[in-house]
Amino acid sequence: MLFRYPRGLKNRIVPLIAATFGYTFLAIAMYWPVAILSYVPAVPDSLVPGATALALSQLQEASGQYPLWQPWVFSGMPTVGAFSYLSGLYFPNVLFSLFSLGGMQLQLLHLVFAGLGTFLFLRRAGLEPPASFFGGAAFMLNPYLSAMLVHGHGSQLMTAAYMPWMLWALMRVVQHSKLEDAGVLALIAGFQLQRAHVQVAWYSWLLFAILALFLFVTLKAPLREKFRPLGLIVLGLSCGVAMSAAIYLPASAYAPFSVRGMAGGGGGSAMEYATLWSMHPIELLTFIVPGMFGFGGITYWGFMPFTDFPNYAGIIVLLFAFIGAYAGRREPFVRFFIIAALLSMFLSFGSFFSPVFDLFYYAAPLFSRFRVPSMALLMLYLSIAGLAAAGLGTLLGSRTESLHRPLRYASLAFAAMLLIALAAGGALEGWLRSLFPVPAVSNFDLALMVNRVRIQGIENGALLLGALFGTALLLLWLGLKRFIPFRAAVLLLGALALGDLLWCSVQVVYPSPSSLRSASLVPEDAVRPAFAPDEVTLWLARQPGTFRIYPAGSLFGENKFAVFGIESVGGYHPAKFSRYEELLAQTGNLASPAVLRMLNVRYVLSLQPVLHPLLEPAMEGELRLASGPARVHVYRLQGSLPRAWAALKAERADGLDAVISGLESPGITPGTVFVSPSSPIAGRTFAPASVKILDRTAESSLIEVSSEGEALLVQSEINYPLRWKAEVDGKPAVIEAVNGLLRGVVLQGGTRRVRFHYDRTGFETARNVSYGAFGLAFLMAISGLPSRFARRS
């Protein structure tokens, strides 16, 4: 099967055009509200980063440079280093911007791109157009990709879209061993890495490595001749990695300082983090009965913390995959998919099947930094799609007389399954109900409703399973008996399989009210309040001076304030500073007035009235959120420290817990800060000083300090020693870590000017590397054009 690629332009272009139209039709039919009515996801994973992205866009337009620091979330943190605001570093967006495509339209485009990549890969592997089209459609319609699109995980979807293209590019390099193919591989690898979902890209490269091993083992060529394609592969991948330098060099530098860096540090907590969302092997039942463990949301009762969709492949797709695996078991292409499917399945089990996962966790580079082992199922979905395409191709080309016996056995098995279901149906329902955990709901009636929906999901899924299996047997029987052409029967069976996948994805995207799940897609107008001004944000934006806010309770994770330049000690981001995460954990999300004052918090926002001697009512107004308007009480925190001040004494404190205890101590002397016992300023006293902020931007600040003796300037900004630098009167100065996470600079007496600035040199160098690598990859990709034109002329 391997490398039996069609000859002739017509045999290649016409099926490709037809497949493009077919996948586009499927995408529009599935997501017509997105494609036509501009619906968008109204989910936190989409709205929260959307607010930050809008704020950073405004900052880039105002400053004229790519923003590397966001001051509005968690008292400040990196952008690119924390995988935020990366759309400007994804080179294809330059082309997409010419057509004014929105974010959701781009995701639909990548969904079609995923189907086309699978189609071309399967064609390169030797499958006929109908089978290849089926494989591409099976991959792009799987519920995992649908859930990514509607739940705000666009980077996952777009990174996954390159997975089959990576395999296609590899096969081209091995088959032709041309520099232009290495250039195409470099472009695909680079673009995939620029979409910046490292875990999905890692799985994609794992598939790439497995296929490369199969290809080189089965390639019938002298060992010496294998070095050329191997060298081209290394060149292409290296160039692709270099294309993403602008993202991954800042990210790798920031990783030791972030919570994601904590995950790779080893130990029990790191392993617990890495194995979150492990899929229990018994949940493989959802691949044939989607509601077996609830369809997601409140009805889910499986072993993961929560999920919004079932992992479903469909009985007909799995039957095709089984046929493809059995019939092509001696083909390297089929063996690759079998090995990839088994490996991805074992990896997805995570802590429920530790031997395979532990091997990768302790031995594979970067793997220990990932969580959500079930994400490995993306490889399984692609493998199942490939095997199912091979199975469909096998049936299309098989001799009908060889299928009578398997069909007879399958019919007997189906009949036995029906008898067992009829005989044990009532007992099985009672047993399943006994397994249901108590739903996390507020009243007994709602709990009964949840369990009723769970049972209905299992019953409907079992009925669907039986109906699909029976229809498949009927279609094959009609074909074998020549009531309809056998090829037509197989194609109808393939269409039924795709309809089944489409049905499941529709349930994920457009849940019915009876499913107890809310719809994720809403009209664009419905989410505009999440980014629109209101009484609270307008009032806060008018307040003079530099300050932060503390959104208490459920408002803590809100990023809307960033759109209006309001800096918060809260917010949401999965890659915050690890030191800040530790502070949140030890103070109950900053529920400490002393810590809030240290962080320059002037206003506290609460949905409920608060009585506290340090809180003075400032205003009450409406805060418009995507979930609806909320009445918010705003209080002024008394005794809040300014953004920059002069400390009088530096006491020793070993660890952040000691710092917090010292700050909260009733006997603390005003002007006291805490430093590490090993700090050169530990135990020293300093002169009083006047502090004035002369200029401030997101990535720099200029402060004037006047004192009669040695002074200690403290800036209430997060200390990130790798990138934030200080100069005193134009000369480099050392930044001391103060109070566990702030910046401090020791100054000699007199009037001094201190400039803090974010060091952009690493990013600018990395971006130049990305541009250069892209130019090289492009030249490599078009290197064959002159010789082609010469041959034609």
Image: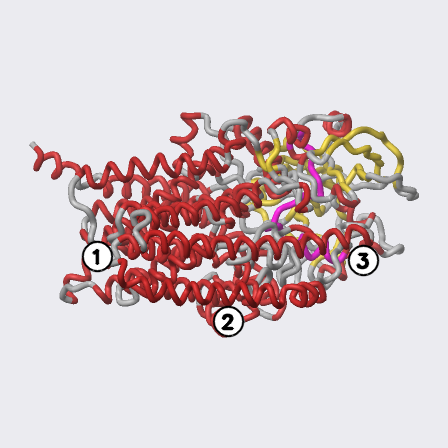
In the rendered image, residue 155, in percent from the top left (x then y), is placed at 49, 44
Question: Compared to 216, does 783 lie above or below?
Answer: above
In the rendered image, residue 342, in percent from the top left (x then y), is placed at 42, 66
Q: Which residue is drawn at the image coordinates 56% and 68% (left, top)?
A: 420
Q: Which residue is mark 1?
A: 229
Alpha-carbon distance for marks 1 and 2? 33 Å
Of the image marks 1 and 2, the number of the one nearer the N terminus: 1
Q: Which residue is drawn at the image coordinates 59% and 40% (left, top)?
A: 510
Checking the image for residue 358, the label placed there is 2
In the rendered image, residue 363, in percent from the top left (x then y), is placed at 45, 70
User: Is residue 585 in the magenta section?
Assistant: yes
Q: Which residue is mark 3?
A: 662
Residue 239 seen by the camera: no
- Picture colour scheme: secondary structure
Alpha-carbon distance for marks 3 and 2? 42 Å
Q: Tell me which segment is drawn in magenta.
A: 563-586
Alpha-carbon distance for marks 1 and 3? 63 Å
